[in-house]
Image (tube, rainbow, N blue to C red):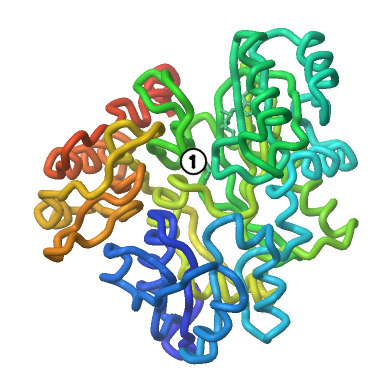
């Protein structure tokens, strides 16, 4: 362990306003290296652990004055859009330490075609794909495939740019919505048609300073809105970590066939990368992992389970990443488990109402080994916490086993309520079944 008694304390600014950013702020609030912690724009839950700063837009024009006024040493950029737009480059140019890649690295998420070509150059396993800009190309690419059909917008679409369907007609319609009806504007003017991958999904988060990388515990998201992985895709209805599927043999395969070629490729192509690289994987029945997609930031809800398990000092780790010193930092592997149940607004991921008053928060937050991260909340005119987004809270339990983590998460959930609240009751079930089949 590093001696933190002499730690030089810095002011940190976390950019973003969701439960992922709340988890980042909470871990930084425990850091021996953090002096004043700021978050912009944040949310009322984050306001309990950081000073909130208003931020009209996540651009250098608005962020730099905050950095100067509050003597901020390090900025941690939560969401992908400002990274893809080059905010990290703009801040670095002004001497700010930044956790998050510049525009060149962020293209791994900002353009799915760029990511696919990069993987092709490095020989990284992924679904076969075609890039299409016209309906003729899209129809040809779809007709040569078998279900499930996968159609994706090339650019950023806030989780709304991927369509997976068993019907050829629906897939063609998705392509038409993007290419002809301009559903997502510029982001959907180029689309990818991919082979559908089958298996179990797995999220690997790797921290890197551009020279070396270190893994956070593996995690698994729950993308579909209803129990049993049914219903439409969402931003993520829950997660758990670590993942029994990711045994040492699979992790070794992931390092060899995916992570090492990815970081080696970035170096070889002179793409600087400091931040977290999210590898979204599909592991098939034979245990072969393939990349579904890269993200260039922490996952949401993955951050909410992975960060509470971190045995190191997050402030120290992020500073080391920005300073190219990640190799010097040691931390223990976790022996605990975490589970996150996302509490969503009625109707989400479709249209939903906002402004519902939330009850039971104080009682829930008294729960042992229970953490409540705010995702989409605001203060009502009377100063009460109310709903302001689709994914309102991440209710996280931590324990010595996955069962214990889940029990604590759902115990907290049972105390919280708001009108039309819904959540999945089966978070972590796949892992529990696997553990029962193959006791370790
Ligand atoms: P994304 O929004 O890019 O994370 O994609 C949303 C979800 O679509 C992924 O988490 C997968 O469940 C699914 N998906 C994306 N690409 C494929 C593929 N090639 N095969 C099967 N499922 C996919
Ligand atoms: N959990 C998926 C994502 O953050 O994109």
Quadrant hosting residue 144: top right
Tell me residue 197's x, y (percent). 66, 20
Q: Nearer the viewer, residue 9 or 390?
A: 390
- Left or right? Give the position of 363 relative to 241: left
- Left or right? Give the position of 157 relative to 220: right
Residue at 39% in and 84% down: 36
Q: Is 227 drawn above or below residue 311 in the view shown? A: above
Residue at 18% in and 60% down: 380
Residue under label 1 = 219
Tell me residue 249's x, y (percent). 64, 33
Residue at 32% in and 66% down: 46
Q: Is 418 drawn above or below residue 403 in the view shown? A: below
- Left or right? Give the position of 317 relative to 153: left
Label 1: how many Cα within 10 Å (few below 14, some 14–19, many 20+):
many
Where in the image, quadrant-wise, is ligand 1 located? top right
Say which element carries label 1.
loop
Quadrant hosting residue 199: top right
Q: Nearer the viewer, residue 177 or 36?
A: 177
Q: Nearer the viewer, residue 178 or 82?
A: 178
In which quadrant is the C terminus drawn? top left
């Amino acid at each position: 362990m590093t001696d933190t008694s002499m730690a030089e304390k810095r002011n940190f600014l976390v950019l973003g306003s969701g439960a992922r950013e709340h988890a980042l702020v909470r871990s930084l609030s425990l850091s021996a290296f953090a002096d004043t912690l700021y978050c912009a724009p944040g949310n009322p839950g984050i306001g309990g652990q950081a000073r909130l700063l208003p931020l009209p837009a996540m651009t250098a024009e608005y962020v730099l004055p905050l950095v100067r006024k509050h003597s901020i040493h390090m900025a941690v950029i939560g969401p992908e859009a400002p990274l893809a737009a080059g905010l990290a480059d703009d801040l670095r140019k002004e001497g700010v330490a930044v956790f998050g890649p510049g525009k060149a690295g962020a293209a791994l998420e900002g353009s799915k075609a760029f990511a696919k070509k990069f993987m092709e150059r490095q020989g990284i396993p992924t679904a076969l794909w075609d890039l299409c800009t016209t309906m003729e190309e899209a129809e040809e690419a779809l007709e040569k495939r078998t279900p499930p059909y996968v159609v994706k917008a090339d650019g950023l679409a806030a989780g709304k740019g991927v369509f997976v369907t068993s019907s050829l007609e629906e897939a063609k319609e998705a392509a038409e919505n993007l290419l002809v009806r301009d559903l997502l504007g510029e982001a959907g003017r180029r689309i990818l048609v991919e082979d559908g991958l089958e298996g179990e999904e797995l999220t690997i988060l790797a921290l890197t300073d551009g020279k070396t990388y270190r893994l956070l515990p593996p995690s698994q998201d729950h993308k579909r809105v209803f129990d049993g992985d049914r219903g439409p895709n969402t931003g993520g209805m829950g997660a758990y970590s670590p993942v029994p599927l990711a045994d040492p043999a699979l992790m070794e395969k992931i390092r060899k066939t995916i992570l090492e070629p990815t970081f080696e490729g970035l170096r070889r192509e002179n793409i600087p990368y400091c931040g977290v690289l999210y590898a979204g994987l599909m592991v098939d029945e034979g245990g072969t992992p393939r990349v579904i997609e890269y993200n260039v930031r922490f996952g949401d809800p993955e951050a909410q389970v992975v960060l509470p398990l971190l045995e190191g000092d997050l402030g120290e780790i992020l500073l080391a990443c920005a300073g190219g010193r990640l190799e010097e930092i040691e931390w223990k592997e976790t022996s605990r488990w975490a589970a996150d149940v996302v509490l969503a607004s009625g109707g989400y991921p479709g249209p939903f109402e906002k402004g519902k008053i939330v009850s039971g928060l104080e009682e829930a937050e008294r729960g042992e080994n229970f953490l409540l991260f705010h995702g989409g909340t605001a203060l009502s005119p009377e100063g009460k916490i109310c709903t302001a987004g689709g994914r309102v809270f991440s209710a996280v339990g931590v324990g010595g086993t996955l069962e214990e983590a889940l029990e604590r998460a759902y115990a907290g959930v049972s105390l919280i309520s708001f009108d039309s609240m819904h959540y999945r009751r089966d978070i972590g079930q796949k892992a529990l079944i696997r553990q029962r089949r193959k006791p370790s």
